[in-house]
Image (cartoon, rainbow, N blue to C red):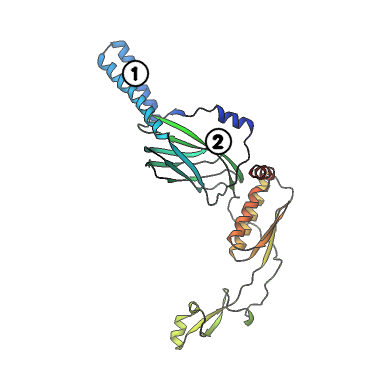
């Protein structure tokens, strides 16, 4: 995750005026309050001391619930662990680390506050002096940088009547990659073709198709031994394979695209890059403002996904880099 740009004035004012705790009534709590109100009306109309005693008990449980839930949220420390990779419109694993110095926490629910990310993580019990990682399956509705302003921690402890929430201010940015899918178009012709023809003896001992069998020489890799053929021949035979030379592709986004067309183009290019890199080729990416040099491997795929995620959000990227500096 990158450092977040400074939030706008309205967001800062709303965060400043927000109360330290918020309280909402659960479905069970609404039933409990209706019963409590009914007992109170019955006690007023009849003057029955037993109803007054029951009413006092019900009201005291409301007070106890508020005190214990507050103790649950006090002295908490929350930090983001983040996600390995987040793709638009599909669940991805997201994590927070929660700890507390003293006391115990129960029935904690964590989520991102004021964020389009959908999903929550749950923790049943948090002991004192131990940091636990809470995992959640979140989903993002679209590609691009998602501003994160804080982490919302909610507890319904102890009776499940009320949900008390505390928001921890933690600013950040989560970069959401284009949605994964299948490439509907061919990536085009490679800039550099194969350097050898199939079956050429100069391009053997690779990872391609089987070219033949050859006796294993001293010092050669024993993992290439074909044991069945070796047992039949009475000597060690190794498998020779044709060497697959890498090809180079340079993918590009069509200029002038916006909206859904841009989203679909980013998904298409991401799928093509995944397919080509998985086959061991080198892939580059031409963007409107810069170009990624062709390279191979999982690191190059991550760089391509990051570049595609920022397409259309260059102004946000510039502000983020300026704030981080």
Cα distance in 3D space between marks 2 and 1: 37 Å
Q: Is residue 272 left or right of residue 64?
A: right
Indicate the secondary structure of the residue bearing disc 2.
Answer: loop
Within 10 Å of disc 1 (Cα), the crowding (few <14, some 14-19, many 20+) is few
Give the camera-side residue of 139 and 162.
162
Is residue 177 depicted above or below 202 in this figure?
above
Residue located 43% across and 85% down the image? 231
Indicate the secondary structure of the residue bearing disc 1.
Answer: helix
* Quadrant assignment for the C terminus: top right
Within 10 Å of disc 2 (Cα), the crowding (few <14, some 14-19, many 20+) is few
Image coordinates of residue 119 in percent, x first then y, are: 49, 41
Give the camera-side residue of 67 and 144.
67
Q: Is residue 309 left or right of residue 112?
A: right
Image coordinates of residue 234 in percent, x first then y, are: 44, 88
Q: Residue furthest bottom?
A: 234
**Mark 1, residue position:** 38
Give the camera-side residue of 247 and 111.
111
Residue located 37% across and 33% down the image? 157
Residue located 65% across and 63% down the image? 295
């Amino acid at each position: 995750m990158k450092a977040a740009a400074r939030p706008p004035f309205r967001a800062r004012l709303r965060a400043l005026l927000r109360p330290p705790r918020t309280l909402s009534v659960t479905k069970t709590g609404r039933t409990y309050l209706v019963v409590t109100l009914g007992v109170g009306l019955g006690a007023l109309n009849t003057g029955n001391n037993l109803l007054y005693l029951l009413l006092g008990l019900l009201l005291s449980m409301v007070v106890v619930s508020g005190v214990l839930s507050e103790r649950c949220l006090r002295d908490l420390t929350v930090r983001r662990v983040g996600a390995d990779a987040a793709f638009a419109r599909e669940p991805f694993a997201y994590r927070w680390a929660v700890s507390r110095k003293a006391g115990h926490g129960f029935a904690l629910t964590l989520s991102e506050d004021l964020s389009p990310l959908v999903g929550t993580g749950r923790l049943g019990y948090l002991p004192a002096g131990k940091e636990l990682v809470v995992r959640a399956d979140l989903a993002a509705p679209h590609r691009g940088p998602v501003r994160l302003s804080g982490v919302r921690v909610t507890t319904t402890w102890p009776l499940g009547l009320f949900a008390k929430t505390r928001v921890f201010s933690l600013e950040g940015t989560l970069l959401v990659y284009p949605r994964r899918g299948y490439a509907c178009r061919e990536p085009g012709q490679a800039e550099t073709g194969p350097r050898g023809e199939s079956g050429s003896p100069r391009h053997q001992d690779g990872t391609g198709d089987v070219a033949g069998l050859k006796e294993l020489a001293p010092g050669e890799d024993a993992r290439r031994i074909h044991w069945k053929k070796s047992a039949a021949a009475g000597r060690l035979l190794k498998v020779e394979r044709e060497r697959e030379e890498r090809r180079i592709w340079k993918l590009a986004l069509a200029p002038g695209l916006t909206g859904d067309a841009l989203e679909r183009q980013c998904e298409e290019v991401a799928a093509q890059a995944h397919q080509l890199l998985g086959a061991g080729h080198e892939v580059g990416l031409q963007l409107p403002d810069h170009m990624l040099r062709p390279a191979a491997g999982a690191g190059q795929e991550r760089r391509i996904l990051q570049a595609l995620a920022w397409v259309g959000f260059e102004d946000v990227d510039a502000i983020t880099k300026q704030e981080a500096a």
